[in-house]
Image (spheres, rainbow, N blue to C red):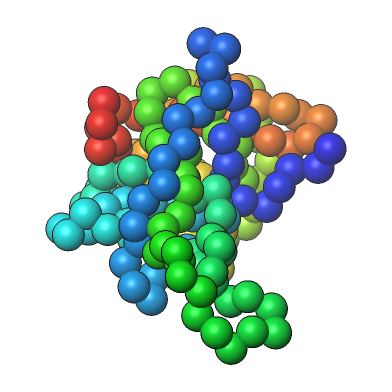
């Protein structure tokens, strides 16, 4: 199985599934599956662009405007019951996520020497990647790798979370 080209939850060491929450997102916010999310001052979900200015809420499991009632095929009618929400895996200290990494704009394969190191993230197009050049605005700790599939397994660090 090849790695998905976006950030997503893969396992929970305590045998549970990741906590999934549905939250209201800010109007016109471009959220895609795998988006790193934060809350704005109004409590609405926005795209987290890296850095340490905002705490991380979680990782989007679906894109914006994908719930029932949005963009129904071949229908000009707006349906009732439409919600401006997106489901996301809550960022916590236990859930393991997979992500691709880059260094200086180049996709980088995992190495065992990077396990236990902490890095920030960078957004490239609609994909969030582990930024191996950012050791200041740390968001993730590398906890494992898969050399066969070139996967990086990461957990959020406490300082980056909305909830600890």
Can residue 86 be seen? yes
- Image point 41% across, 40% down: which residue? 21
- Image point 74% across, 43% down: which residue? 3
- Which quadrant of the figure contains the C terminus? top left
Residue in the foreground of this view, choosing between 69 and 16: 69
- Image point 63% across, 75% down: which residue? 72
- Residue 50: x and y in percent read 36, 54
> Which residue ends up furthest to the front in the rendered image?
80
- Image point 81% across, 42% down: which residue? 2
- Which quadrant of the figure contains the N terminus? top right
In this view, 5 is above or below 91: below
- Residue 140: x and y in percent read 42, 35
Q: Is 62 positioned to the left or the right of 25 in the image?
A: right
Q: Is 2 positioned to the left or the right of 41 in the image?
A: right
> Which residue ends up furthest to the bottom in the rendered image?
76
In this view, 67 is above or below 3: below
> Which residue ends up furthest to the left in the rendered image?
41
In this view, 22 is above or below 98: below
- Residue 32: x and y in percent read 54, 61
Q: Quadrant of residue 144?
A: top right
Q: Quadrant of residue 153?
A: top right
Q: Is 103 positioned to the left or the right of 92 in the image?
A: right
Residue in the foreground of this view, choosing between 5 and 115: 5
Residue in the foreground of this view, choosing between 135 and 123: 123
């Amino acid at each position: 199985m090849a790695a998905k080209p976006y950030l997503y939850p893969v396992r929970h060491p305590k045998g549970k599934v990741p906590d999934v929450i549905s939250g209201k997102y800010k109007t016109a916010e471009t959220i895609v599956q795998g988006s790193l999310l934060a809350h704005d001052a109004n409590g609405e979900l926005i795209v987290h662009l890296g850095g340490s200015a905002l705490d991380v809420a979680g990782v989007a499991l679906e894109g914006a405007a994908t719930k029932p009632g949005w963009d129904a095929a071949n229908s000009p009618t707006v349906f009732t019951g439409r919600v401006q929400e997106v489901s996301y895996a809550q960022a916590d200290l236990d859930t393991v996520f997979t992500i691709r990494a880059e260094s200086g704009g180049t996709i980088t394969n995992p190495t065992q020497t990077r396990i236990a190191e902490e890095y920030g993230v960078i957004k490239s197009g609609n994909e969030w990647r582990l930024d191996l050049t950012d050791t200041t605005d740390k968001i993730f700790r590398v906890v494992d790798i898969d050399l066969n599939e070139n996967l990086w397994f990461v957990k959020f660090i406490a300082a980056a979370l909305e909830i600890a």
